[in-house]
Amino acid sequence: MSVLIIGGMHRSGTSMTAGWLKRCGLSLGQDLIPGDWTNPRGHFEDREVSHFQRAILSAAGVDHYLTGSDPIPVAPEFHQQGRELITRRSGHAQWGFKDPRSALLLDFWRELLPEARYLFVFRHYGLVVQSLLRRQRTPKAHVLQVSRFAKVWKRYNEDLLRFHAAHPEDCLMVEVFDLLGCSLNVIEHANERWGFQLRPLDIKDVAEDRLLTRDGPLWFDGLCRMTTRGLDPVYERLQEASRESLQRIGHAARLAG
């Protein structure tokens, strides 16, 4: 059994990535959350996995807009429920799931699925915060909302970086707009190194232009930095991890800057 967990901050391209991998032959579940105006092509989230992870967070007294660095306690009953969830999917030779909340629960899934591999997707903090504001239909950038979303971006991506550093051979970290050039390399790596049997389809067939913009307004990036310290160092670490992943899969790494 081959398992792939697709992780990343909300509004970072995880839905596009999951939709592509589904077309490549990765089973993502029988009951997927349908699309809406925020993701017209679909969220590609297994409803049961999403509800399960929401329940874990709720039991811990937090929600998916989590900030800070405190680990999330997982109540003992969720370990058995998680094992049952996995058993229900064990009939698939290659399966996985996408839910941004997974970024907050990576150690939990590592314990239950030690054989799992991980594809992490990230996007610049300014673009993510802008997208979150649009999703909430916020006409203007309120400083408190910008601050909250920027801190959430930082929390999610620091959790990805920590897990990636601990398990580098089991993870790939890719900036979302780099997927256009390296998607076939990702499939080749997953098949040859991780034991998957995915069809080599190019993500360009499902790419969403709005996710592949690299730069946002400089003033908005400055507003994010004003409200939340340490964003640029986290983004630089993500880029470095991405360069390492791209080199590992045989794709020429993009120069930063």
Image (cartoon, rainbow, N blue to C red):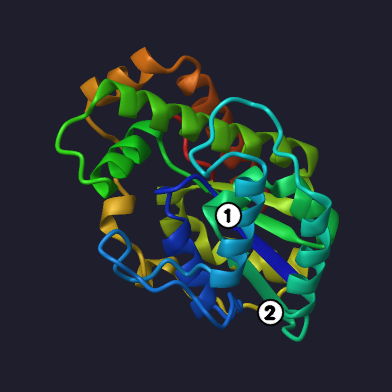
Task: Quickly name the residue at label 1.
Answer: 54
Choose top left, top right, bottom left or bottom right for residue 68: top right
Choose top left, top right, bottom left or bottom right for residue 257: top left
Q: Is residue 250 visible?
A: no
Please say if 111 is above or below 22. Answer: above
Q: Element under label 1? A: helix
Callout in the foreground (1, 2): 1
Q: Position of residue 222 (x, y in %)?
A: 30, 18
Q: Position of residue 81 (x, y in %)?
A: 77, 66
The residue under the point 49% across, 75% down is 32
The residue under the point 56% across, 36% down is 157
| Disc 1 to disc 2, C-alpha distance | 31 Å
Mark number displayed over residue 197: 2
Please say if 200 is above or below 224. Answer: below
The residue under the point 34% across, 36% down is 129
| Side of 9 relative to 27 (left or right) | left
Name the residue nearer the viewer: 122 or 134.
134
Name the residue nearer the viewer: 42 or 142.
142
| Cβ–Cβ under 8 Å for marks 1 and 2 | no
